[in-house]
Amino acid sequence: MQSRALVDFGEVSLNRAMRVYGPVGDLSYRDGQFYPSKAPFLSFAAAPIYAVLRSLAGNTIGAVPEIPLVFFGRLFLTVVPTLIVLGLLRRFLATYVDGAVADLFVVFYALGTLAFSYSLQFLSHQTSAVLLFAGFYVGWRWARSEASRGVLLSVGFFTGLAVAAEYTSAMAAGLITIWIGFCRPGSARTRSTAVAIVAAGAMAPMLVVGLYHWRCFGSPFETGYKHLADAAYQPWHLGGFLGIRTPDPRAFVLSLFSPLRGLFALSPGLLLGIIGLRRLWRARAQAPELGPIAIFTISLLVGYLYFTSSFSYESWGWTTGPRHMTGLVPFLLLPAALLYRQLVTPLALGVARGLLAASVLITGCLTLVNYVPDDVSEALFGLMVPLARRGDLVPSVLSFFGLSNPWSGSVFVLAIVAMTSFVLVGGTLPDRRSARSPLAALATVALLLVGHLVAYRGTPGDRGAQELLARVWLTPPGSVPRFWSTTGFR
C-alpha cells in the first residue's frame, strides 16, 4: 500500500491510497495520518516495481491489481536475493567442508528452514536475513585477505539496509560490526579503522531511515511501533526496549519447540548447528578466522534467544515458524556442516541426515500453506495434509498458465518429497556409505512425523482454520486463478 502511495500520490502516508484501494492492517497513526508500522525498506524498494507495472497497464491509478504487484515484489525482493545468497552460502561452506556436504546444507537452508517460508512471502524477514549474510560474507572475504579494506563500506551498507528492512536486525548488524573489529589480526588502530569504515557504509541507509521516522513519527528515533493504530497490539511493544523485556520461559519453549511453529520442531536440522558450535570453535586451529566467527555466532545465537524469550510469543502472528529468528538461520549452517563432516558412524550420519530431511519435508510442506492460525494444534497434519487431500492447494505459476488444482499444486508437493529423498540419500561421502545409514535416516524422519501427528488434536480450531484457508487463501480443485486480478478469480 505504501508503494502505491509513493508512486500514485508522492506520499508516504496511506490515507489517500486506502481510499482508493481499501483498508490494510499493521498501521501506525500520527497527526491524522496512517503509515505502515513496519520498517520502510520493502515499501520503497517495491515502488519502482509498481511504477513499471503501472506504466505497462496504462499509467493510471488503480490499474495494477494486488496479485501481480505482490508477485513481482516478492520475486525481485525476496526470491531472487535468496537465490543469489544460496551461491554465496555454497562458496562459504565449501571453503571448510566437502562440496557434497556444502550442497546438502544449501538444499537444507533453501527448502528446510524459514528461508523458504519467507522468501515466498512479501515480508521483510528473509530480505533482512539475505542482507545480513551478504554483509557478513563480504567481511569474511576481507578477514581471509581476499578483498581490500574498501569492501567494508559494503558491509555497512548491507547491514544498514537490513535494519531498514527489519528493525530487529539492528542486533545482528551491530554484532557484525563488532566482529569486523576482531575478524583478522591487526593493531588497535587498524581494528578501529575497519569498524569506522563499516559504520560509514551504514550511514546512508540509516540516514534515510532516520529522515523517514522524523517525517512520519516526529523523531529520527521514533518508529511506527510507538504509534500503533490497533490498540490490541500496543501492549506487545510497551515496556522495555520496543517491547523487549526480561525473558519468559513460556516464550522461550514455545518459540523453539512448539509443534505448531517452534523453530526446532519445524526445522530439527538446525539442532546440528547448535551442537556444532563446539566444533566450529575447535576448527580455528586449521582456519584462524573461524575463532572470531565462532564467538560471533554464539553471541548472535544468545541475542536471538534473548529476543525471542523476552518478546510476546503471540506476536509471531499467523506465520510459519518464529519469523523474527529468520536472520539467525544462515549463520547456523557452518557449525552444522562442520559437525556433519566429522560424523563417522552410520547411525550418527543417518540421524543427522534424517533431521535435515525431516526439515525439508515439514517446513517445505508448511510453506505451501504459509498461513498458520494461532488456534491450530499442529499445522502439518492439522492443515497441510487434510487440505492437500481435498485438493485445496496453493495457487502457483502453473495455475496462472491454466493448470488447475490439484495438479498444479501437486507438482510442488512432489518437488518437496523429491528433495526430501535427495537429502535422505545425498551428502554421504563415498568412504562413509553404509546400508544402515539410510535406515537410521528414515527412522528419524518417521519418529519426527509421529511426534507431529501426536501433537495434532483435531480441534474445532483445526477444522475452522482448514475452512478459512480453503475459502480465502488456497485454490480449490478445478479452479484456475487469474493473475491480473485483485481477488484472483475475477
Image (tube, rainbow, N blue to C red):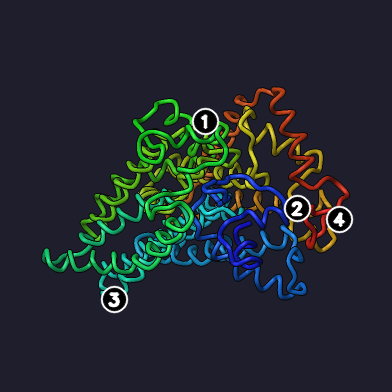
Task: Residue under label 3, please give it.
Answer: 150
Under circle 3, the secondary element is: helix
Residue 395, numbered circle: 2
Task: Residue under label 4, please give it.
Answer: 490
Q: Nearer the viewer, mark 4 or mark 3?
A: 4
Badge count: 4
Asked where in the image residue 320 lies, by quadrant, the reply is top right
- Asked if residue 229 lies left or right of residue 56, the reply is left
Kindly report the distance in space between the C-alpha atoms of the residues bearing marks 2 and 1. 28 Å
Circle 2 crowding by C-alpha within 10 Å: few under 14, some 14–19, many from 20: many
- Asked if residue 151 lies left or right of residue 38, the reply is left
Residue at image position (32%, 73%) is 151
**Which mark is first along the chain, 4 or 2?**
2
Q: Mark 4 belongs to which amino acid? A: Arg
Q: Is residue 262 at all visible to an observer of this figure? A: yes
Q: Position of residue 254 (x, y in %)?
A: 48, 30
Q: Mark 2 belongs to which amino acid? A: Pro
